[in-house]
Image (spheres, rainbow, N blue to C red):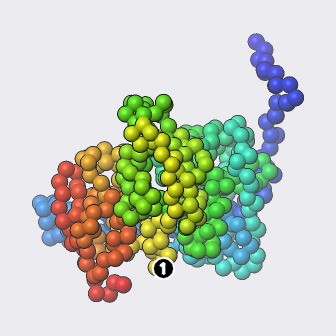
């Protein structure tokens, strides 16, 4: 039987499969690095003390957890000859030590210049003995579904591994953060590839390999990369400020589902539904209310809530923006002045978040997270994602999955509000915490030698 290819449209030719990816691989290897990070984590279980183990067995996990050193592997790529390196934020998260190994096998201690958790991007700096080769950044917007791409990294510690595939999809939302906009590829990506480059056939970086979907822990042909055009602005801000300064409106939003269309006077599912408005936020001062549906922002139509988040983040602090919304089926026009996120502003003076100073990593409580941790629907607050070892939170009964509802008796409805109130706390702070359907108070206290 003869297999026939369909003819290309007039004026177009069918692209042939590349004979080899050797040129791309050869150019990429010198700029891709191995990253080894070490951190201390809390682990339950035996500490070797039979008395403590006895109490843990009969009275639960209230006793301190055992500290354990954990090493992780990742990848990165060099963007300047003097040693700036891009990787994923999760590769270096909470690391006490970071080492970078070059293709030449030279190793250097690295420092973190800045981290942006919301896009999962980190910028590192080493002090090389000689100028380094650098990666060329491309244009991810020019990618088309079906284009060939090459992934280079260090899966399972296997240095300079090269895999090839195609762009399977663009603009993927996978629930990784508020600015999801991933390139999906079937180029093989495995643990250890995180932070490495995704390249086009010209050898230009078009993405940062970041995540996979897998049931086994290995590649099944569904990998995701952060578009380099999204990353460029983040990298520049991290290099200049050590953090990303984003516009802030002060609203919690969600998509309008088909069954909500009639209730909100819409003709179809569109817009960003306002669930909460932060008191004294730009949205509050502009007159935006819970239940409003924002359908246009700064001249751009809003079809999904993530589009609004991206548009707000792009605007500089202090800029005015026109908002078109629907309230009770009627269209209203408002003007809002963009502010700076309290969560990110808290990083400006100290270089660390207020929540982390207390040993907490917090995130917004989404409907999905509420369902996962069995939090009642009417509860608002900041969900504890992680507790840092040796911190005030570590010495308390708090645990991941708890929701902080109040900080020193002030209600908080988001991670940003929680950060703001924790930054105001003194040597102790009283938290109202929700765990499942139960709630209670927890007092955190700084130790004498803690700043």
Q: Quadrant of residue 164?
A: top right
Residue 444 in picture, x, y percent from top left = 25, 74
Residue 227 in picture, x, y percent from top left = 64, 52
Q: Between residue 210 and residue 261, name the one nearer to us.
A: 261
Q: Quadrant of the N terminus?
A: top right
Residue under the point 37% across and 33% down = 263
Q: Residue farthest to the left?
A: 58
- Is residue 91 at least partly visible in the picture? no
330 lies above or below 278: above
Disc 1 packing (10 Å; few <14; some 14–19; many ≥20): few
Q: Give left or right: position of 166 versus 277.
A: right
Q: Quadrant of the C terminus?
A: bottom left
328 lies above or below 116: above
Q: Give left or right: position of 168 versus 63.
A: right
For label 1, the residue is 349
Q: Residue farthest to the top?
A: 1
Q: Give left or right: position of 26 versus 61.
A: right
Residue 119 in picture, x, y percent from top left = 54, 57
């Amino acid at each position: 039987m003869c297999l026939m290819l369909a003819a290309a449209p007039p004026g177009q030719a069918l692209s042939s499969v590349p004979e080899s990816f050797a040129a791309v691989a050869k150019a990429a290897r010198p700029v891709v690095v191995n990253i080894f990070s070490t951190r201390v984590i809390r682990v339950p279980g035996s500490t070797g003390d039979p008395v403590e183990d006895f109490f843990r067995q009969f009275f639960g996990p209230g006793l301190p957890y055992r500290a354990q050193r954990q090493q992780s592997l990742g990848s990165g790529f060099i963007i300047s000859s003097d040693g700036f390196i891009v990787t994923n934020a999760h590769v270096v998260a909470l690391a006490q030590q970071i080492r970078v190994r070059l293709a030449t096998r030279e190793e250097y201690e690295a420092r973190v210049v800045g981290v942006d958790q919301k896009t999962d991007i980190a910028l590192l700096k080493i002090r090389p003995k000689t100028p380094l080769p650098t990666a060329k950044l491309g244009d991810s917007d020019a990618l088309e579904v079906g284009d060939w791409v090459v992934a280079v990294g260090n899966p399972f510690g296997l240095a300079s591994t090269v895999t090839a595939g195609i762009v399977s999809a663009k603009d993927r939302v996978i629930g990784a953060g508020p600015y999801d906009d991933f390139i999906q590829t079937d180029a093989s990506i495995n643990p250890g590839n995180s932070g490495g480059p995704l390249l086009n056939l010209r050898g230009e970086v078009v993405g940062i390999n970041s995540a996979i979907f897998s049931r086994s822990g290995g590649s099944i042909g569904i990998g995701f990369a952060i578009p380099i055009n999204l990353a460029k602005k983040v990298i520049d801000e991290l290099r200049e400020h050590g953090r990303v300064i984003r516009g802030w409106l002060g609203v919690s939003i969600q998509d309008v589902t088909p069954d909500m269309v009639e209730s909100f006077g819409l003709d179809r599912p569109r817009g960003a539904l306002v669930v909460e408005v932060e008191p004294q936020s730009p949205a509050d001062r502009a007159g935006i209310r819970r239940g409003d549906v924002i359908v246009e922002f700064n001249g751009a139509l809003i079809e999904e809530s993530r589009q609004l988040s991206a548009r707000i983040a792009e605007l500089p602090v202090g800029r005015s923006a026109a908002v078109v919304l629907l309230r009770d089926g009627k269209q209203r026009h408002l003007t809002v002045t963009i502010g700076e996120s309290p969560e990110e502003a808290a990083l400006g003076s100290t270089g660390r978040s207020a929540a982390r100073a207390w040993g907490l990593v917090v995130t917004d409580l989404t409907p999905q997270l509420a369902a996962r941790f069995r939090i009642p629907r009417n509860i608002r607050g900041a969900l504890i994602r992680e507790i840092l070892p040796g911190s005030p939170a570590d010495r308390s009964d708090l645990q991941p999955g708890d929701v902080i509802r109040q900080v020193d008796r002030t209600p908080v409805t988001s991670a940003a509000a929680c950060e703001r109130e924790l930054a105001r706390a003194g040597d102790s702070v009283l938290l109202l915490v929700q765990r499942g359907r139960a709630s209670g108070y927890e007092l955190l206290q700084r130790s004498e030698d803690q700043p």
